[in-house]
Image: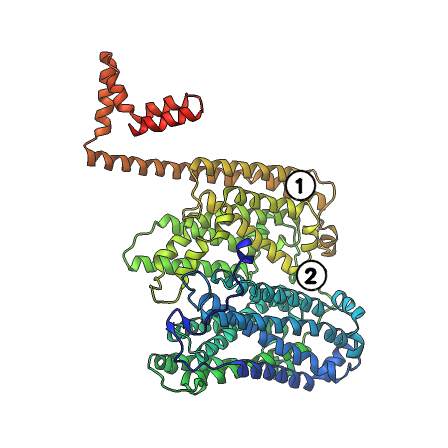
Amino acid sequence: MSGFMSDTLSSTPSSTSSSSGTRTDRRIGSPVGLYLGATVLAGIVAAVIGAAFLGQSLDALGIPDPGPATSWGVPLVRGAGTVLACIGIGGFLMSALGAPPRADGYLDVDGFRAARTGTWAMVGWAVCSLLLIPLYLSDVSGAHLSETLQPDMWGTAISQVSTAGAMRWIAIIAGLTAALSLLTRKWIWQPVFLAGAVASLIPIALEGHSASGGDHDYGVNSLLWHVILGALWIGGLAALVAHAARRGPHLPELVRRYSWLAMICIIGMTISGVINAAIRLSFSEWFTTDYGRVIVLKVVLTAVLAGFGWLHRRRTIPQLAEPDQSSAWWKRPFVRFAIVEVLVMAATVGVAVSLSRIPPPVTFTADISPAELVLGFDLTEPFTLGTALTTWRFDLIFGTGALLLQAVYMWAWLRLRHRGVEWPVSRVIWWTFGNLALLFATSSGLGLYSMAMFAPHMLQHMMLTMLIPVFWVLGGPMTLLLRALPPAGRDGIPGPREWLVVFINNPVSRFLTNPVVAAVQFVIGFYALYLSDLFSAMASDHFGHVFMNVHFLISGYLFYWVAIGVDAAPRQLSPFMKLLMTLSAMAFHAWFGIAMMQMSEPLAESYYLSLQLPFPVDLMEQQHTGGAIAWGLSEIPLVLVSTMHAVQWAKQDKREQKRFDRKAERDGDAELEAYNAMLAGLRDGRDASQEEYYGADYQEDEVQGMLHSDEAKRAHRRNHRE
């Protein structure tokens, strides 16, 4: 962190040079007007549609009209803020992945301006989120905005209105991202700011229509995919327009890359959007209800945007290779086309935001179970091996992640085979086992019951931490990708291969792969989560479950990457040190399991009791069983890891033997001849051959036996010189 804070902030990037040469001959434009227009357009569209259905919303909620300031202000501010969030994500996307850094590791002029666009857009997103806190309190209570703007009402809004609480977290994440991005111009930090900007969208998926009622787990997860992919799509295009306005370098290559990103986003948005809409209304209601008609309008606008993307690939991308002599940046074909596309995207955002103002045609039945109300699905039978194997519910986050990871790996493997490069089939099998295990741990009955009972939760925890990462690191994904991905070249912009190299070799990775750090972070998570109130606080929250699963996977991957990974790590350890590190970590994990079995109070008792499962559940028995699982099953990965250590040790010895054999072929086996001469000398009673064989080793042993004085050290150096 000291390197982060110690950047030279006073020096401003020169506007006359970049990685591609001087820029004094360029006429640079500014996309600020476009950004403002898109922001205002999104807010107005959301406000107009929301006002048209205001009466229905008030009748459904049973509250009085809070006044035009609130009725128009909520959709207007949220629509504008959402577009600003997209612009911020696009700015950091360009500075992190689209602008090559300078030789000293700092952003060039294009990267700097893109990063500053991200910074100020995040500031605007944070301000809009803060304004929405009193607006949402006024909206749900019917009080006038002048009342809810009072400082003492903000705490009430955050504690009692879920949407206001979500806006609080958005303001914190977006504001923190903006503040940190002002402190450094180093390229290596830009992906961190991009992650922070994307994370500011997560609270949106955790509130509203998708987070309530049955199947809300699908609603939240599908909306999360939908929002993030949409932001990358919109933000990426806005960043390209800004880059073209600055006459930045490598525009044709950046547009080609964005074309692939846009295609992935439109496919993902279509699938997630259909899933999310299907939860709240049937297909026939798309055309017979107001909520459905607004969804149809959003679908039409999305289809128009997809058509724009197709036209980009067919017409404007080939034109980018031709020199453009136009003096005005906004007159160029790509920019004109992209400006219209950005404005249509802004209108689509406004339509999407207006959906939160329209009550969906969902009838909540009285027979919905407490478990389904909390979890999104119902559990009717006790947890057994049969229910774990036969009950399936695809997890939209981790199940999709497993499929994507497998697809990328297979693509890289097939690419190597096409080039005639060998890759061990055993590594493909290990990687496939890991993704199949992830699919089972999160989408089978084990994944469902892990959210309602502690013993299945701990079994899932063990798979996510101690089994799946082992399979993954034995698959060697980073080495495979480094061989399959093409290099950017000396004058090209960094691509996926260069980003992967930076991920492997940077100060943060070197710190995390320190054997002590890797072992401590692997162990301390168990104690911090379960031996404190943290698990009880996170168990009842959907995001809490997602966060725990992500933590388990990352923590386990970091540990086993150092312990037995076949990918090159920033720190290389001997097989003995790896084995010692593994034994130490497993010992602490076994103690954790014993501590769990000795606890006298159940964890997250109120949450588990609130589910009111239709079969008896002994919470203490579940917890003791979970502790026994943590204690006993830790031996299984230990056996696997120890076996792999032995295999890797044997391979290392084999490589050393081959190295000695090659050396013997080069020097005629001189070392063996000298050793045989030494043995013959000992047999004949001569010591000269022994002195000649050991040479400096005898002198070194003699020096180690001397007193550690200055005179002894000088004598040692003198003997070596002689």
Q: Which residue is mark 1?
A: 596
Tally of numbered tags? 2
Corner quadrant of residue 141: bottom right
Q: Is residue 342 above or below residue 231?
A: below
Measured as percent of width and height from the top left, residue 19 is found at 39, 69
**For the point 44% across and 84% down, which residue is it?**
329
Q: Which residue is mark 2?
A: 374
Q: In the rendered image, is residue 5 in sight?
A: yes
**For the point 41% across and 72% down, which residue is it?**
17
Corner quadrant of residue 394: bottom right
Q: Is residue 658 above or below residue 391?
A: above
Q: Is residue 167 above or below residue 29?
A: above
Measured as percent of width and height from the top left, residue 196 is found at 57, 64
Query: Mark 2 or mark 1, which has the lower sequence index?
Result: 2
Q: Secondary structure at mark 1?
A: helix
Q: Amino acid at mark 2?
A: Val
- Left or right: residue 421 versus residue 453 is left
Q: Amino acid at mark 1?
A: Met
